[in-house]
Image: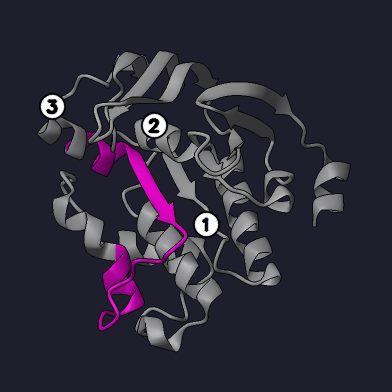
Amino acid sequence: MIELEHIRKTYSRPTGETVEALADVSLRIEQGELVAIVGTSGSGKSTLLNVLGLLDRPTAGRYLFESREVEGLDVRAQARFRNEKIGFVFQAFHLMPRTSALANVELPLIYSSRASVDGLGLKALEAVGLSDRVHHLPSELSGGQQQRVAIARALVNEPELILADEPTGNLDSQSARDVMDIFRALSDAGRSIVIVTHDPAIAAQAERVIRIERGRIVADDRVATSAHLEEAR
């Protein structure tokens, strides 16, 4: 589904020094895979996630999404592609505080090119087990429930890829398990999920763990078995 070929990303500091955030990264992610990206602070894992999400343009290399080369799309085409194909979940929930759960979930539909969006918000909330919290404000929800609303918002356009940056970082252990249960169910249904995490227990629940250091992939392991998942839980 996704293929990165020799991706590089460099930044220039005000001093003129060049920093290489990603160095010759090549990677394939198949449909339905649940992948964790791990690494130390500054290793390049968030930059890699931003490249996958078309939030950051690589300095060099190719990015193919469903066999379509996308790294060279202009800003407007990238925005349209993200809205249709990619959902984002972050550590901070980024919910509008005075807006209901349903209205928060439906926000991406404002930019949808679908002929009809009726019922998609309710469907997404049902998928994360919050059909009974449709009209609740974020302040009336627990942290775990707020993150589930954020996941529903990422799902509402029915994207093929979900990118999650430290999605359990602000959650208690039970809420984190609930979120990972949702991600596994989405993966089983055919969506590709990529999670950046610093938590080994969360990474252990993925099917595949990619370790990145100094902008390079240094390990790529398929680790999950049924027994392994039970141990992680």
Q: How far is disc 2 from disc 3 in space, using C-alphas?
A: 15 Å
Q: Residues within 10 Å of mark 1 (few under 14, many from 20)?
A: many
Instruction: Pick whichever of labels 1 and 2 is earlier in the sequence.
Output: 2
Residue that numbered label 1 is attached to: 167
Q: Is residue 194 above or below residue 141?
A: above
Residue that extends furthest to the bottom in the rendered view of this protein: 140
Q: Identify the amino acid type marked 2.
A: Leu
At 27% across and 21% down in the image, what residue appears? 71
Residue 177, given in percent of the width and then of the height, sits at: 68, 62
Indicate yes or no whether the magenta region holds residue 40. no
At 32% across and 73% down in the image, what residue appears? 102
Residue that numbered label 2 is attached to: 52
Instruction: Pick whichever of labels 2 and 3 is earlier in the sequence.
Output: 2
Q: Residues within 10 Å of mark 3 (few under 14, many from 20)?
A: few
Q: Which residues are magenta?
A: 80-105
Residue 143, given in percent of the width and then of the height, sits at: 52, 76
Q: Is residue 123 above or below residue 57?
A: below
The secondary structure type at the circle numbered 2 is helix
Q: Identify the amino acid type marked 1.
A: Pro
Contact flag, marks 1 and 2 (Cβ < 8 Å): no
Q: How far is disc 3 from disc 1 in space, using C-alphas?
A: 29 Å
Residue 112, given in percent of the width and then of the height, sits at: 18, 48
Residue 181, given in percent of the width and then of the height, sits at: 65, 56
The secondary structure type at the circle numbered 1 is loop
At 34% across and 55% down in the image, what residue appears? 156
Is 168 displayed left or right of 130 in the figure?
right
Q: Is residue 117 above or below residue 158?
A: below
Q: How far is disc 1 from disc 2 in space, using C-alphas?
A: 16 Å
Is 181 displayed left or right of 87 in the figure?
right
Instruction: Pick whichever of labels 3 and 1 is earlier in the sequence.
Output: 3
Residue that numbered label 3 is attached to: 74
Judge by depth and name the residue closer to the eye, 31 or 205.
205
